[in-house]
């Protein structure tokens, strides 16, 4: 397990406990009391560190290389997944996955950004940064969901939309703008869950939803901390300060009524217990789908429109 800088005291104590356990096993010496004492100390240390994370530390957890990605959640939460490819204009964008699936027997449309675990896969997935064809594919599949009255579940995890020349030539901004407009009009329940990074228009391009949920250690922001620091302080080294002023954590977003729900994570992050976070997300999806489907369908679009129109607070 890759350890972040602020996790090093935890890792060192875990290593010491394991060494004592190995010594006890090899030398037949009873060190159970010392091991128990250190395990209690470890538990307190974990709660102290993870219970007082800064915004920048949460950004680091959101980017953790072992954190579950969209395909991980699809395989653990859903059955009968059938991936749908292509935007019918240019190509298939592998940074944004779309498809049909079932969750507890209920048919849904699922989509989400997908990162890679190694260099080869990251190049294939473009580090989770979607191209215009990815957003057009997403819209095509959402319109399919509307036609067949299937709810849509979106997993958001991207540093941002791909900013390359080719993407701009093929209409990156226009593709995202069209999605913002059309997702307001998709007449079927939509649930969006930020599972890692929620970067700028790249996230918002599939983020217009009836319910917007953010994992406890994920972030959702108009710009990355590094990008903000480069603009305001002319230095990427100011990213920790930028993370604080951006108010990008789940707690900050909920206070400002920008999201609907915080999804709790296992202590230390989703990657510490993938099965537990998968079960939690599944419960969140089922509960929200039940609530959305129980209301009058004719009010769905009006409620979604009002939800986003009321965003915006002014502090004098």
Image (cartoon, helix red, strand yellow):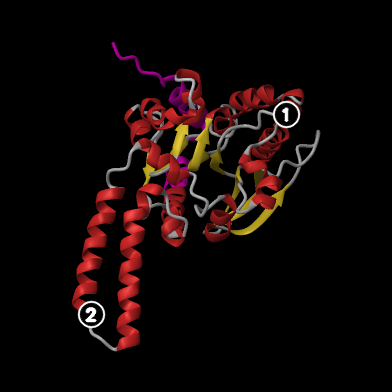
Q: Secondary structure at mark 1?
A: helix
Residue 305 colored magenta?
Answer: yes
Of labels 1 and 2, the one closer to you:
2
In the rendered image, residue 256, in percent from the top left (x then y), is placed at 35, 27
Which residue shows up at 40% across the image and 29% down it? 258
Q: Residue at position x 34%, y 73% from top?
A: 19
Q: Look at the image and give the residue range highlighted in magenta.
A: 287-316
Apparent side of residue 115 relative to residue 220 in the rendered image (left or right): right
Residue 167 - label: 1
The one nearer the camera, 239 or 212, is 239
Which residue corresponds to mark 2? 31
Q: Is residue 175 in view from this perspective?
A: yes
Residue most extreme to the top: 316
Q: Nearer the viewer, residue 221 or 186?
A: 221
Disc 2 packing (10 Å; few <14; some 14–19; many ≥20): few
Q: Residue at x 43, y 46 (%)?
A: 61
172 lies left or right of 60 = right
């Amino acid at each position: 397990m890759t350890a972040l800088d602020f996790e090093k005291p935890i890792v060192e104590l875990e290593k010491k406990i394991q060494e004592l356990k190995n010594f006890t096993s090899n030398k037949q010496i009873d060190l159970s009391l010392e091991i128990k004492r250190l395990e209690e100390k470890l538990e307190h240390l974990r709660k102290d560190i993870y219970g007082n994370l800064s915004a920048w530390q949460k950004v680091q957890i959101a980017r953790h290389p072992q954190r579950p990605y969209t395909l991980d959640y699809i395989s653990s939460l859903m059955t009968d997944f059938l991936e749908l490819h292509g935007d019918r204009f240019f190509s298939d964008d592998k940074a944004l996955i779309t498809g049909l699936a079932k969750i507890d027997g209920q048919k849904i449309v699922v989509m989400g950004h997908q990162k890679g675990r190694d260099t080869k896969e990251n190049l294939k997935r473009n580090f989770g940064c979607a191209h215009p064809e990815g957003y057009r594919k997403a819209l095509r599949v959402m319109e399919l969901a509307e036609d067949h009255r299937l709810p849509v579940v979106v997993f958001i995890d991207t540093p941002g939309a791909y900013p390359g020349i080719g993407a701009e030539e093929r209409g990156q901004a226009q593709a995202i703008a069209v999605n913002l407009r059309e997702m307001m009009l998709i007449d079927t329940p939509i649930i969006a869950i930020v599972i890692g990074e929620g970067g700028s228009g790249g996230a918002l391009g599939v983020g217009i939803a009836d319910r917007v949920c953010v994992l406890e250690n994920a972030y959702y922001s108009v710009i990355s901390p590094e990008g903000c620091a480069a603009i305001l302080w002319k230095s990427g080294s100011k990213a920790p300060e930028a993370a604080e002023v951006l108010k990008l954590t789940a707690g900050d977003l909920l206070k400002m009524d920008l999201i609907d729900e915080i999804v709790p994570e296992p202590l230390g992050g989703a990657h510490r217990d993938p099965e537990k976070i998968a079960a939690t997300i599944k419960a969140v999806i089922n509960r929200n789908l039940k609530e959305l489907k129980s209301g009058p369908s004719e009010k769905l679009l009006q409620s979604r429109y009002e939800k986003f129109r009321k965003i915006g607070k002014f502090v004098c």
